[in-house]
Every structure is written in structure tokens, then in C-alpha cells.
């Protein structure tokens, strides 16, 4: 029997007053045209906080000390292939499962700037109370849950969101 695998991801949550930093994805093949926080996969041989620091530098030109990061939320999530294709999960290789770690930075150095214009066509501050309608749903859910003090949730199963 093949062992199940999940992909770990690091998400950076920056909050300035009542606003949070979002980027709009483009040319990636995943959620293009929609908003997310700065994020990416773990590269391996790095901790979740180290991956978050690296992504902050690569995507937004920010320097963050790992000790300035605190865990905001962890989400075990999955996306089902049939949502996009209408095919049953078995036909497309099953669900894609992810472990999404959301870290909030209390301090950072630098002014956020778009370091990857080939993958992001906007990087801007948005009110937490009025996120763009096209914010990626799991990101919106994780932000809301984390800011309410919920440290763990699941997304993409039959459970209500």
C-alpha cells in the first residue's frame, strides 16, 4: 500500500492596523486572478518559520526574523478534482491534501514590494473586514479562524466551511 502524502505550505500574515497584505496571483496555473497572502511550499530541510521567512524575502522583499513569527493557524485542507472537472476523485488521482501553516509576523523590515511580477500582478494592503470577493476561499477562512483564536481547522471535506 502506498503511503499517503500531503504538501506542507507556509503562509505569511502581515497586519498593519486594520489591513492585511495580499497579492493577486497571475501566470502560475493555480488560482490566477485571485488574492492570497504571501505563501509557498516548504523546500525541505527547513522549518515552517524558515519557509515563511524565505517566502517573505522572495515574494515581497521583506526581512523577517523567525522569532518575530507566531503561529496564527494550521489548516489541513484538500481540493477535490471533481470540483473543476466533474470527474470522481479516483479518476483524477484523488484529492490533493495540504497542511497549510499561517504565521503572523509581529515585526518586519522593509516595505512590501512585488518581487515576482511574473507570478503576481498586485501586492497591496486590504481591510481585513472587507477582503476582495476573489480572495482564495481557504485563505479567507484561515484568516478569519486564526484571528478568532482558532488554531486548527479542516477545509474541503464534507464539513461546513
Image: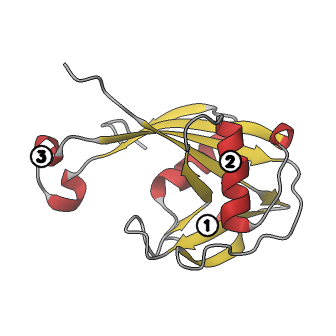
User: Closer to the N terminus: mark 2 or mark 1?
Assistant: 2
Foreground mark, 2 or 1? 2
Residue at x 78%, y 70% (from the top left corner): 112
Placement of the C terminus among the 4 image quadrants: top left
Check the image and name the residue furthest to the front: 45
58 or 13: nearer the viewer? 58
- Residue 50 at x, y percent in the picture: 71, 41
Q: Residues within 10 Å of mark 1 (few under 14, many from 20)?
A: some
Foreground mark, 2 or 3? 2
Secondary structure beneath dot 1 equals loop
The residues bearing labels 2 and 1 have C-alpha atoms spaced at a distance of 22 Å
The residues bearing labels 1 and 3 have C-alpha atoms spaced at a distance of 32 Å
84 or 141: nearer the viewer? 84
The residues bearing labels 2 and 3 have C-alpha atoms spaced at a distance of 34 Å
Secondary structure beneath dot 2 equals helix
**On the image, which quarter does residue 73 sit in?**
top right
- Residue 130 at x, y percent in the picture: 64, 67
Numbered badge on residue 52: 2
142 or 106: nearer the viewer? 106
- Residue 31 at x, y percent in the picture: 42, 66
Amino acid at each position: 500500500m502506498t503511503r499517503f502524502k500531503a504538501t506542507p505550505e507556509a503562509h505569511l500574515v502581515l497586519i498593519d492596523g486594520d489591513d492585511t497584505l495580499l497579492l493577486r496571483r497571475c501566470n502560475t496555473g493555480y488560482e490566477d486572478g485571485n488574492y492570497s497572502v504571501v505563501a509557498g511550499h516548504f523546500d525541505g530541510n527547513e522549518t515552517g518559520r524558515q519557509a515563511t521567512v524565505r517566502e517573505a524575502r522572495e515574494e515581497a522583499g521583506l526581512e523577517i526574523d523567525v522569532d518575530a513569527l507566531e503561529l496564527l493557524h494550521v489548516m489541513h485542507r484538500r481540493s477535490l478534482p471533481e470540483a473543476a472537472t466533474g470527474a470522481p476523485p479516483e479518476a483524477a488521482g484523488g484529492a490533493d491534501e495540504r497542511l497549510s501553516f499561517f504565521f503572523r509576523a509581529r515585526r518586519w523590515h522593509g516595505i512590501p514590494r512585488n518581487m515576482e511580477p511574473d507570478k503576481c500582478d498586485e501586492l497591496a494592503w486590504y481591510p481585513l473586514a472587507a477582503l476582495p470577493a476573489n480572495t482564495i476561499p481557504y485563505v479567507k477562512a484561515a484568516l478569519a479562524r486564526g484571528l478568532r483564536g482558532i488554531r486548527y481547522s479542516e477545509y474541503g471535506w464534507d464539513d461546513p466551511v
